[in-house]
Amino acid sequence: MSYNLLKGKKGLIFGALNEQSIAWKVAERAYEEGATFVLTNTAVSMRMGTIGQLAEKCGTIVVPADATSVEDIERLFDKTLEFHGGKFDFILHSIGMSPNVRKGRTYDDLDYGYLQKTLDISALSFHKIIQVARKKDALNEWGSIVALSYIAAQRTLYGYNDMADAKALLESIARSFGYIYGREKKIRINTVSQSPTPTTAGSGVMGLDGLMDFADRMSPLGNATALDCADYVLTLFSDLTRKVTMQNLYHDGGFSSMGMSARAMSVYNKNLELEYRDVKNR
Ligand SMILES: NC(=O)c1ccc[n+]([C@@H]2O[C@H](COP(=O)([O-])OP(=O)(O)OC[C@H]3O[C@@H](n4cnc5c(N)ncnc54)[C@H](O)[C@@H]3O)[C@@H](O)[C@H]2O)c1
């Protein structure tokens, strides 16, 4: 259902790789809500994924850019400003990758070159994008910038590895730049801390299926899907949230406030019973 929530809004969306991507769902929903936007991803991801189909569907262009390269980002902003015929209103940062996770290097055996890449791709890119946006004065007043985060920034979750450090940095950048950009241009900057979601990046996390099941059992509303996430992000791009800034906003069905739920406890108890029976049988 469309509410025309973003009618007349113009944006830039990073990170749509394929139909599973959270950024893909944001783009589809933003289009339905009346926004126009430019899509971007790395040249490699454009070849690997299906972003061209999304662009066609949303009547827009895809501009290749590596979000770790300031030069690429500057070129991307020039093209986006040209596409919109001037300033625009929203940016989505939906970018994450850890070479340590990909190569199976555990947190107690990190490759530091990879760690730098993790931080650069997953967190510093957010700083670079905002810095370029501000220097080029690319955003309209009361614009909105959103990045996607995960609760591993606050709590230790097995297998999330150095991405936890990247998310902590990402959320800090939202606060630090949120102050500067808010004070000067009324631009708001927030992070959305999303439930585990079955996407290409998500499936890189060790034991995603178990993590998703655990989070779902713990969350009174169940896990938030990519589409749920898109709907929430749209509200942050809309004029209905103009005074929300420098926040890390949990979008996780209640997971972040839970300690133990009956649904999670039932699995735990079942396992204990099995273990107990095992011990008795031995
Ligand atoms: N999937 C989950 O469980 C989950 C949960 C919470 C937060 N998130 C976050 O959501 C965001 C989107 O991930 P997703 O789950 O949709 O997976 P995804 O794999 O679809 O998206 C990740 C994107 O990052 C892009 N990317 C990687 N390196 C890049 C670079 N150098 N420059 C530009 N883009 C680059 C990839 O091409 C891809 O499009 C990430 O920040 C991720 O950490 C995901």
Image: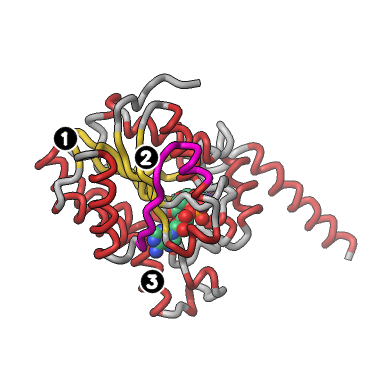
- Choose the circle earlier in sequence order: 1 or 2: 1
Does the image show residue 189? Answer: yes
Q: Which label sits in the foreground, 1 or 2?
A: 1
Q: In what element is the residue under mark 3? A: helix
Residue type at numbered disc 3: Lys
Residue type at numbered disc 2: Leu
Residue 55 is a magenta residue: yes
- Choose the circle earlier in sequence order: 3 or 1: 3
Residue that numbered label 2 is attached to: 249
Residue type at numbered disc 1: Glu
Residue drawn at the location 28% of the way across and 58% of the way down: 73
Q: Position of residue 249 (x, y in %)?
A: 37, 40
Q: Nearer the viewer, residue 227 or 89?
A: 89
Residue 117 is drawn in which quadrant?
A: bottom left
Relative to 33, does residue 249 appear above or below in the rendering?
below
Residue drawn at the location 66% of the way across and 43% of the way down: 265
Q: Nearer the viewer, residue 271 or 70?
A: 70
Q: Is mark 2 within 8 Å of ligand 1?
A: no
Q: Which mark is residue 4?
A: none
Marks 1 and 2, how far apart in space? Answer: 22 Å
Relative to 220, does residue 19 appear above or below in the rendering?
below
Residue drawn at the location 88% of the way across and 66% of the way down: 282
Q: Which label sits in the foreground, 3 or 2?
A: 3
Magenta stretch, residue numbers? 53-66
For disc 2, the neighbor class at 10 Å (few under 14, some 14 to 19, many from 20) is some
Residue that numbered label 1 is attached to: 141
CB contact under 8 Å: marks 1 and 2: no
Does the image show residue 164? Answer: no
Residue that numbered label 3 is attached to: 117
Marks 3 and 2, how far apart in space? Answer: 26 Å
